[in-house]
Image: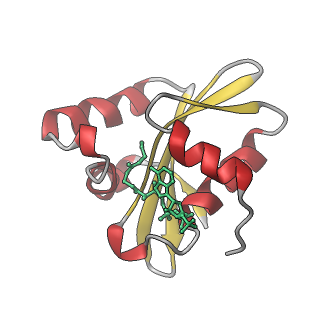
C-alpha cells in the first residue's frame, strides 16, 4: 500500500533513501528529505507491507509530466515486485501526467515500462 510521506516518517524515510548508493551520507539524506518537505511539487510516498515501511519513491510533479527522482526498497524485500508496484501506483495517482525518468532512475524505470508484475 502506498502512503504519503509525513514528518513522523522522516527517520524511516531516510533509512530507505540510504539504500540509494549516491545518497548514503547523512547530510545528503537530510537535504533530500528537506527538498521534498519544502516543495509541494516534490512528493514522497512509502510502501507499507503489513506493519513495515519497506520502500520509498520520490517524484517531482510538472504540468504535463512527473519525474521519478528516487526509488528504493529495503534489501530484504527486493525482487518481490515492490519497486514495480510503487511505479505503477504513482502513475495511477498522477494520471494523465506522463512519467519521466532521471539519469539515476532510468535503468529501473525502463525495466518497469517493459515488464508487468502482479503484487
Ligand atoms: C531498484 C530497486 C528499487 C528495485 O526494487 P525491487 O522491489 O527489487 O524491484 P522489483 O522486485 O519490482 O523488480 C525486480 C527486477 O528489477 C531489476 N532491477 C533491480 N534494480 C535495477 C536497476 N537499477 N536497473 C534495472 N533493473 C533493475 C531486478 O534485476 C529484477 O529483475 P527480474 O525481474 O528480471 O529478475 C531496488 O533494487 C533498490 O532499492 N535498489 C537500490 C536503490 C537504487 O539503486 N535505486 C535506483 C536509483 S534511485
Q: Residue at x 33, y 56 (%)?
A: 16
| Residue 49 % position (x, y) | 51, 76
In this rendering, would 48 be left or right of 117? left
Residue located farthest toward the bottom when viewing the structure as drawn: 50
Q: Which residue is drawn at 72% across and 73% down?
A: 118
Q: Which residue is drawn at 47% across and 28% down?
A: 103
Rendered position, 34 above or below 113: above
Residue located farthest toward the left when viewing the structure as drawn: 26
Q: In which quarter of the image is the N terminus?
A: bottom right
Please tell me in which quadrant of the rendered image residue 119 appears.
bottom right
Q: Residue at x 36, y 55 (%)?
A: 9
| Residue 5 % position (x, y) | 47, 49
Q: Which colour scheme is used?
A: secondary structure
Please tell me in which quadrant of the rendered image residue 77 appears.
bottom left
User: In the depicted view, which residue is nearer to us: 31 or 82?
Assistant: 82
| Residue 40 % position (x, y) | 54, 26
Q: How many marks?
A: 0
Residue located farthest toward the right when viewing the structure as drawn: 96
User: In the depicted view, which residue is nearer to us: 111 or 52?
Assistant: 111
User: In the depicted view, which residue is nearer to us: 36 or 6?
Assistant: 36
| Residue 113 % position (x, y) | 71, 48
Amino acid at each position: 500500500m502506498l502512503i504519503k510521506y509525513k514528518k513522523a516518517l522522516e527517520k524511516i524515510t531516510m533509512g530507505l533513501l540510504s539504500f540509494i548508493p549516491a545518497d548514503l551520507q547523512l547530510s545528503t539524506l537530510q537535504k533530500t528529505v528537506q527538498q521534498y518537505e519544502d516543495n509541494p511539487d516534490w512528493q514522497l510516498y512509502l510502501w507499507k507491507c503489513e506493519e513495515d515501511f519497506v520502500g520509498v519513491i520520490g517524484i517531482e510533479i510538472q504540468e504535463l509530466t512527473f519525474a521519478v527522482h528516487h526509488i528504493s526498497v529495503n534489501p530484504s524485500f527486493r525482487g518481490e515486485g515492490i519497486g514495480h508496484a510503487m511505479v505503477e501506483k504513482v502513475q495511477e495517482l498522477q494520471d494523465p501526467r506522463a512519467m519521466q525518468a532521471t539519469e539515476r532512475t532510468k535503468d529501473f524505470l525502463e525495466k518497469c515500462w517493459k515488464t508487468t508484475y502482479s503484487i
